[in-house]
Each structure stands twice: as structure tokens, then as C-alpha cells.
Image (spheres, rainbow, N blue to C red):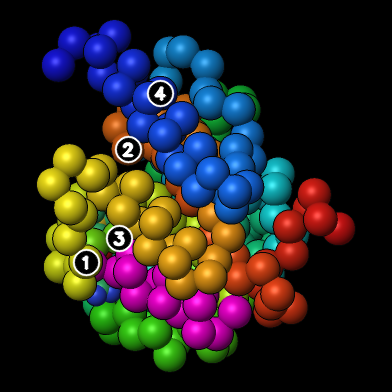
Amino acid sequence: MSKRKDRRKGAELYEAVVHSAGNGDVAALSAPPEPRPLMRKFRFQLLHRWMVEHLTPCRVADVGGGKGLLAYLLRRSGWDAVVIDPVPQPLPAKYRNLVTGEQVHIPETESVPRISASFAQEMAQGFDLLVAMHAHGCIVRVIDAVAQYGCSAIVMPCCVIDEPLTPAPGVHWLQCVVDYAVARGCTVQAFRLNFKGQNIGLYVRRPTSAAAAPHKDAA
Ligand SMILES: C[S@@+](CC[C@H](N)C(=O)[O-])C[C@H]1O[C@@H](n2cnc3c(N)ncnc32)[C@H](O)[C@@H]1O
């Protein structure tokens, strides 16, 4: 697929997701990104920036958080962040600061708290917010946790791997996730980050919950 077609498809999917509920359940939280997206490897810095801009610091678990760069950045911003991932992975040695453009080295002595286990719904009880970015097999369980325990979640679904739900023919996985969350009584707000690849995020909340991560706009 050409880059232009790829961008158009992404924009169409975003519009479809934003308008899918038709009753205000799905609303755009931020404008679609400008052209010239950054590489996929900057997604942690971009999601970190989005979270800091839109939410107040809270207890957050990065489900399927891999090497833990998002949790590391959040902790530096004052969040109580941990990784839940069954595969032990060290922090990356460096990352790029998107504001200054500089490479930042992470000392070998640094680490983030990790729960080395497969994500289970009950784990959500200790957190205000769950993040599941490209987290294999965890998206539906994270939404179930929001519905059951009243935390909030940011999910960025990419592939359908080990999920208990399969999209109907012709339905995009992202749309299927939105429909599932709304059917479970959650509100969903879509946003896009400016990196190449599946860059649409869903901020999922249970409307009446006091446990959810406080939203800056709602404060
Ligand atoms: C594609 S990677 C995504 C990592 C990171 N979130 C990112 O965006 O680069 C998927 C991650 O999910 C983790 N994972 C797979 N099954 C999981 C499970 N049941 N519970 C929690 N994490 C899981 C893997 O170990 C891996 O680190």
C-alpha cells in the first residue's frame, strides 16, 4: 500500500471509530496528528506526552509493557507506574527526548517495578489506570477490568492475537474493541498519536466510577 493510501486509510478508520457510537459515547479527545509522522519507535515518548497532557498522575500499570520505557518516562514525571509482562526484559539503554532531540542514556542501574506474570483481570484492583499498547492477548481483558473494577484504561489495539473476541468479517479490530467497550457500559474517547503504524488510542472509562484516573479536562 502506498504511503498516501496508508495515511488515508488511517484517517478513515479514525473517523469511523470517532463516530461509531452515534450517541456521543465516542468522541475525539485530540485532533488527528499532522503529516510527517515519527517512527514507530517513538510511540512511548508520544504516549507519555499525551498522558501527561490529558491525565493527572496516578497508579498505572503498563500491561504488556515490554522493556518498560513508558513506565520509566511516567515515573520520571511523578506517576506510580509498573509494568505487567510475563517476559523479563531490561530497560532500553537509551531513548530520544522529543523536545530537545537529544539521546538520553538510561543508566544500567535503573529499573522499573515489574510484575512478571500474565495479566489477569483481578490485578486491575491495585491501579487507577491500565495501559495496553500493542499488548498481545490483553485488550479484551483490560476492558473487562475497566467494566468490573472501575479503573480506566488506554488501549492501542494492533493485531488480534490470543483474544477471546474475533471481529466479524469486514469489521476492523479497533472498531470491534470500541463496540465491545461500549456494550460493556464504558465510554470511549479516541485519540491519535503521531507515529507510523497503528497509532489510534482509545481512552476507556466507566462513566460513574470514582476510581478512574482523573481526567484533566474534567477537573
Ligand atoms: C508487541 S509487544 C508490545 C510491547 C510494548 N507495549 C510496545 O508497544 O512495544 C507485546 C508484549 O505483550 C507481552 N505479553 C504477551 N502476553 C501477555 C500477557 N498475557 N500479559 C501481559 N503481557 C503479555 C509480551 O511479553 C510483549 O512484551
Tell me which label, 4 or 1, sits earlier in the chain.
4
Tell me which label, 3 or 1, sits earlier in the chain.
3
Nearer to us in this view, 13 or 114: 13
Give the alpha-carbon distance from disc 4 to disc 1, as whole Å: 24 Å
Residue 24 visible at all = yes
Residue highlighted by disc 4: 11
Is residue 149 part of the magenta span, yes or no? yes
146 horizontally vs 119: left or right? right
Give the alpha-carbon distance from disc 1 to disc 2, as whole Å: 19 Å
Q: Residues within 10 Å of mark 3 (few under 14, many from 20)?
A: many
Residue highlighted by disc 2: 198
Residue highlighted by disc 1: 165
Q: Which mark is residue 135?
A: 3
- Up-down: is 54 above or below 4? below
Q: Amino acid at mark 2?
A: Gln
10 horizontally vs 218: left or right? left
Q: Residues within 10 Å of mark 4 (few under 14, many from 20)?
A: some
Q: Secondary structure at mark 1?
A: loop
Q: Residue at point 25% right, 43% down?
A: 172
Q: Secondary structure at mark 4?
A: helix
Task: Give the prevailing secondary structure in the magenta stretch.
Answer: helix
- Quadrant into which the C terminus falls: bottom right
Report the span colored magenta. Answer: 137-150
Q: Residues within 10 Å of mark 1 (few under 14, many from 20)?
A: some
Mark 3: C-beta under 8 Å from nearest atom of ligand 1: yes
Nearer to us in this view, 204 or 184: 184
Nearer to us in this view, 26 or 80: 26
